[in-house]
Image (tube, rainbow, N blue to C red):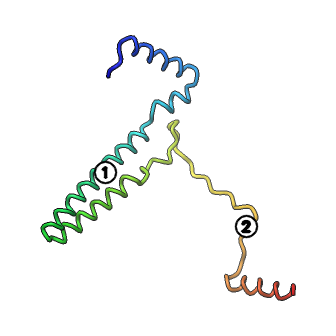
């Protein structure tokens, strides 16, 4: 049911008041291009999965293995497309490109030298020395 003129005016006034009070929150609630792009990817991916399913069923019913295999591949590609992040997913919402920062090392973990077997032998020797 559509809103009446009075309700639309009230809604617009509330939106303006929200934008004036908390512009960050209003901007986040308004939506972004990333959200629209993610929805578009999801819709295209679901359409590809449905098309692949149709090809798979047709291929199975006509005993054409290549058509069924192609349908499966289309389904798989559609699912991967729908649920994978877009290339620009790491970009910030303020228009500035996102910068990848290296992870700090975990506390208590240091880089040890030597091979795995060498470290195991050292541990064994330390244990035997403690007994």
Question: Quick one: SS at disc 1?
Answer: helix
Q: Position of residue 31 (x, y in %)?
A: 45, 34
Q: Position of residue 36 (x, y in %)?
A: 39, 39
Q: Residue under circle 2? A: 109
Up-down relation of residue 2 to residue 73 (above or below): above
First of labels 1, 2 by sequence position: 1
Q: Residue furthest left?
A: 62
Pick the quarter of the image with the C terminus. Answer: bottom right
Q: Residues within 10 Å of mark 1 (few under 14, many from 20)?
A: some
Question: Quick one: SS at disc 2?
Answer: loop
Up-down relation of residue 107 to residue 123 (above or below): above
Q: Marks 1 and 2, how far apart in space?
A: 44 Å
Q: Residue under circle 1? A: 46
Pick the quarter of the image with the N terminus. Answer: top left
Measuring 46% from the left and 30% from the top, which residue is drawn there? 30
Q: Position of residue 38 (x, y in %)?
A: 40, 45
């Amino acid at each position: 049911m559509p809103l009446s003129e009075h309700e639309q005016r009230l809604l617009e006034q509330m939106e303006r008041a929200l934008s004036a009070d908390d512009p960050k929150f209003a901007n986040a609630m308004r939506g972004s291009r990333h959200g629209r792009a993610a929805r578009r990817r999801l819709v295209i991916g679901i359409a590809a999965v449905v098309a692949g399913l149709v090809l798979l069923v047709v291929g199975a019913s006509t005993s054409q293995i290549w058509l069924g295999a192609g349908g499966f591949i289309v389904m798989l590609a559609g699912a991967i497309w729908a649920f994978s992040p877009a290339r620009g997913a790491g970009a910030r919402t303020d228009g500035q490109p996102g910068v990848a920062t290296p992870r700090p090392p975990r506390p208590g973990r240091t880089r040890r030298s030597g091979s795995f077997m060498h470290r195991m032998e050292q541990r064994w020797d330390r244990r035997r020395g403690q007994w």
